[in-house]
């Protein structure tokens, strides 16, 4: 598992890589189906897709969720799939939610042993400097936990 978070100019960058033990068609089918996101999210987030989980993704698709980013703090999140390149990548961006900025790129490439999946998340916390000071480390650790959980679930699913 390879998960790193760096920061520059108030923007955090999360990078994660994982080798999936399947072919590119199988990986793409799984990740381009929004309802599968539920299985990749820890239960303690109270994550629930409230609309947009039907069918496959496409540029312009809006997906809405309820979740708890921090304990006891429920929030609504609206994302838009902004770009899709079949079996290569897709990008989702927050339209409404807990972050001042959320841009998530999902990249897929076939390898000799399966599929290399790379995630690039650019995010910015609300409230500028005070937001970074109060929650920067907490949110970074929370995102590492979420991506670690996802890593383990994908290992199980594509074993």
Image (tube, grey):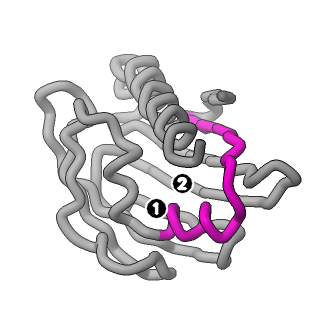
Q: Secondary structure at mark 2?
A: strand
Residue 89: name its quadrant.
Answer: bottom right
Q: Secondary structure at mark 1?
A: strand
Total labels: the figure holds 2
Name the disc covering residue 93, or none: 1
Q: Residue 71: x percent and y percent?
A: 18, 25
Q: What residue is shown at x 61% (from left), y 38% (from top)?
A: 13
User: Is label 2 in contact with label 1 (beta carbons under 8 Å)?
Assistant: yes
Gap between marks 2 and 1, in whole Å? Answer: 6 Å
- 138 left or right of 158 in image: left
Q: Is residue 24 within the magenta segment?
A: yes
Q: Quadrant of the N terminus?
A: top right
Could you say which is closer to the camera, residue 125 or residue 86? 86
Q: Residue 140: x percent and y percent?
A: 47, 25
Residue that lies at the very extreme toward the right in this rendered image = 112
Which class describes the residues within 10 Å of circle 2: few (<14), some (14-19), or many (20+)? many
Vertical position of residue 74 compared to residue 38: above or below? above
Vertical position of residue 85 compared to residue 96: above or below? below
- 126 left or right of 26 in image: left
Q: Is residue 47 within the magenta segment?
A: no
- 135 left or right of 75 in image: right
Q: What residue is shown at x 32% (from left), y 35% (from top)?
A: 42
- 2 left or right of 31 in image: right
Instruction: Choose the circle earlier in sequence order: 2 or 1.
Output: 1
Which class describes the residues within 10 Å of circle 1: few (<14), some (14-19), or many (20+)? many
Q: Residue 119: x percent and y percent?
A: 62, 48
Q: What residue is shown at x 23% (from left), y 59% (from top)?
A: 49
Could you say which is closer to the camera, residue 37 or residue 76? 37
Q: Which span of residues is magenta-colored?
A: 10-32
Residue where numbered disc 2 is placed: 104
């Amino acid at each position: 598992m390879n998960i790193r978070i760096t920061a520059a100019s108030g923007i955090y960058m999360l990078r994660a890589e994982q080798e999936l033990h399947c072919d590119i068609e199988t990986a793409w089918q799984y990740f381009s189906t929004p309802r599968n996101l539920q299985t990749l999210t820890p239960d303690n987030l109270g994550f629930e897709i409230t609309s947009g989980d039907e069918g496959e993704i496409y540029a312009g698709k809006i997906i809405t969720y309820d979740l708890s980013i921090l304990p006891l703090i429920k929030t609504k999140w609206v994302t838009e799939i902004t770009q899709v390149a079949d079996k290569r990548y897709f990008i989702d961006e927050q339209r409404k939610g807990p972050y001042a900025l959320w841009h998530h790129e999902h990249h897929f490439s076939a390898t000799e042993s399966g599929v290399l999946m790379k995630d690039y998340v650019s995010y910015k916390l609300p409230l500028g400097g005070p937001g970074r000071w109060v929650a920067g480390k907490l949110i970074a650790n929370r995102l590492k936990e979420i991506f670690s959980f996802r890593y383990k679930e994908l290992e199980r699913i594509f074993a």
